[in-house]
Amino acid sequence: MLHTITSLPFDNTYVRLPELLFSGVTPARVSRPHVVSFNADAAALIDLDPAEATRADLAEYLSGNQLIPGSQPIAAVYSGHQFGVYVPQLGDGRAILLGEVRNSRGEKWDIQLKGAGQTPYSRMGDGRAVLRSTIREYLCSEAMHHLGIPTTRALAIVGTPDAVHRETVETGAILTRLAPSHIRFGTFEFLCHTGKHGELRVLADHTVNHHFPHLREEERRVARMFREVVVSTARLIAKWQAAGWAHGVMNTDNMSVHGITLDYGPFGFMDAFNPGFIPNHSDPMGRYAFDQQPSIGFWNLRCFAAALLPLMTREEAMEGLDAYQPAFLEHFNDLMRSKLGLRQSLAGDRELAVDLLALMHADGADHTNTFRELATVEMGRDRQAMRDAFRDREAFDAWATRYCQRLQAEGSADEERRSAMNAVNPKYVLRNYLVQTAIERAQRGDFSEVDRLLDLLRRPFDEQLEMEAYAAPPPDWGRHLVVSCSS
Ligand code: AMP
Ligand code: MG
C-alpha cells in the first residue's frame, strides 16, 4: 500500500533510548520552500506514493515548516575523531531525525532533514545547508546506490530563497535523507568516553536488536556485531577504491555501523587516475587521500573497537580487527578481476591490475573511461582505439599483450566478456564538472540538470546514446575544481 506524506507509518525507536543520546528539537522555519527535485526511487523505500511529488504542500513537510504526522523530531548526539583528534562532543548540528518508518517489506528507514535549523549540537554553526552541497549529496548518494555501493539515500531537495552565509552568500536547502539508521562509530565513542557504560550497553543492544537481528540471541553479540561492522566497512571501502571514489572526510563521526557511505561533503570521483587524489581542499596533508582510505578505515575501526571495550574483551576486539585486511583484499581483488573481465582467479591477476593502474597514473588516463574501454579489446585483434588513449603506447601494448594472454588462459570469449565488463565498469559517474554545471543552473533557478543527472545516474552501466557527452572527461575548466569543506 502506498502512503501520502501525511500517512507514513512511523515506528520511532531511537527516542526510546536513554535521553542523553538526543534532544527534542523543532525544525526552524524557512521562507517559500519549493521542491527542487524529488526521487521516486527513494520514495519507494518508504512506500511513499510517487504522485506526492507534485503535492502542493510537499515542500512544507520536507522543509520542516510543517511536521509530518507521527514524526518526533530529534537531534542525535555523537562524538568522534576528526582528522585524528578526538572531539568530545559533536552531534546533529543541522540534521533533524523526524523518525523511523517501517515499509511493507519490514525494513525500517530513518527520515532525516539535513539543513533544517539549529540544534543543541550546532556549536558555532547556523544549522543550515546550502543548495550547492545539498545537490552534491543528493546526486552522489543516488549515483553510488546505482553503482552498487552501499549508501544513505536521498528522497528530495527543498530549496528556500533564505540567504546562507558561507565563503559567499548562497541560498539554503534541505535534503531529506533516508538510512537504516544514523548510528555512527562516534555515537558509541560518545558514550564510552563519557563513562556512560550502562547506556553504551543499551545502545549496543538497540543496534543489535534492530539492525543485526540475527545476532540477538548470541551470547557474545557485541563482539559478533563488531566483527560484522569490520567486514562491511572493509567491503565498502574496497568498493570505493574500485570505483575511484574518495569520501574526503573519513572522520569516525562520518562512519556508519551499517557499512554504508555516510555524510557526503567534499567527495570526488577521480577523472585522471591518481592514487594521491585529495578531494577535500581543506586536507592539505592528504590524511583522507584516495590511497589512504583502506588504512583509515582500519584506523577508524580501532576507535570503534576501543569504544566497545566495556562490552567486549580485548581478544574479541583483536579478532574482529583481524578480519579487516582479508575482507578488504578479497573483495578488492574480486572487484578488480571483474573490472578486467576475468572469471577465474589466477596467480598474477593482482599484478596485472596493479600494472594497469600504474600505467594509467603515469599517463593521466581517465579512471572510469579506461576501464569501460577495456571491454572493447578483442583477443588477437587490433587495439588501436584503446592504445591511442595512452601516450606511452609501447607500455600499453606490452600490458595488453599480457592481458590477452591472461584472457586466453581462461578461454575468455570476447562478446561474453564485453557484456560482463560493461555491467561492472560504469559508463557514467558523477564527475565534479557535471555536478558543478547542475549546481550553477540550479542557483539560477533551473533545476532540470539536477533531474537529468539523477536520471542518467540511475543507469550508469547503460549506453545512453543521447547522453554520450556526459561520459567525457572534464573540459579544462572542470579539471581542478576546488571543493571546500563548507556546506
Ligand atoms: P560534517 O563535516 O559535515 O560531517 O560535520 C561535522 C559536524 O559539524 C557535525 O556534527 C555537523 O552536524 C556539524 N555541522 C556542519 N555544518 C553545520 C552547520 N552549518 N550548522 C551546524 N552544525 C553543522
Ligand atoms: Mg558528519
Image (tube, rainbow, N blue to C red):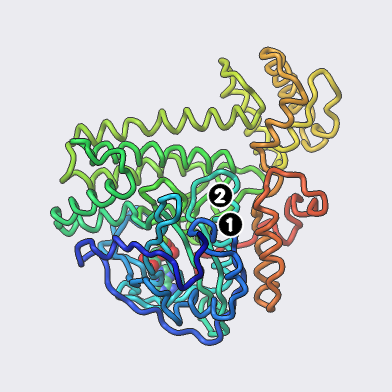
Question: Which structural element holds mark 1?
Answer: helix
Residue at image mark 1: 41
Residue 192 seen in this snapshot: no
Q: Which residue bears the numbered disc 2?
A: 145
Q: Is residue 408 in view?
A: yes
Q: Is residue 178 above or below residue 415?
A: below
Q: Quadrant of residue 438?
A: bottom right
At label 2, counting other C-alpha atoms closer than 10 Å, the crowd grade (few under 14, some 14-19, many 20 or more) is some
What amino acid type should be assigned to the residue bearing mark 2? Answer: His
Q: CA distance from mark 1 to mark 2?
A: 11 Å
Task: Point out residue 78 in the picture as x, y percentages from the top left corner.
Answer: 29, 61
- Left or right of 304? Residue 405 is right
Kind of residue indicated by mark 1: Asp
Q: Which one is nearer the viewer's eye here, 286 or 336?
A: 336
The residue carrying pointer 1 sits among few (fewer than 14), some (14 to 19) or many (20 or more) residues within 10 Å by Cα, namely: some
Q: Residue at x 54, y 61 (%)?
A: 43
Quadrant in which residue 375 is drawn:
top right
Q: Would you say the residues marked 1 and 2 are in contact, meaning their CB atoms lie under 8 Å apart?
A: yes
Using the image, tell me which numbered label, if any, was put on residue 277.
Answer: none
Residue 408 drawn above or below residue 254? above
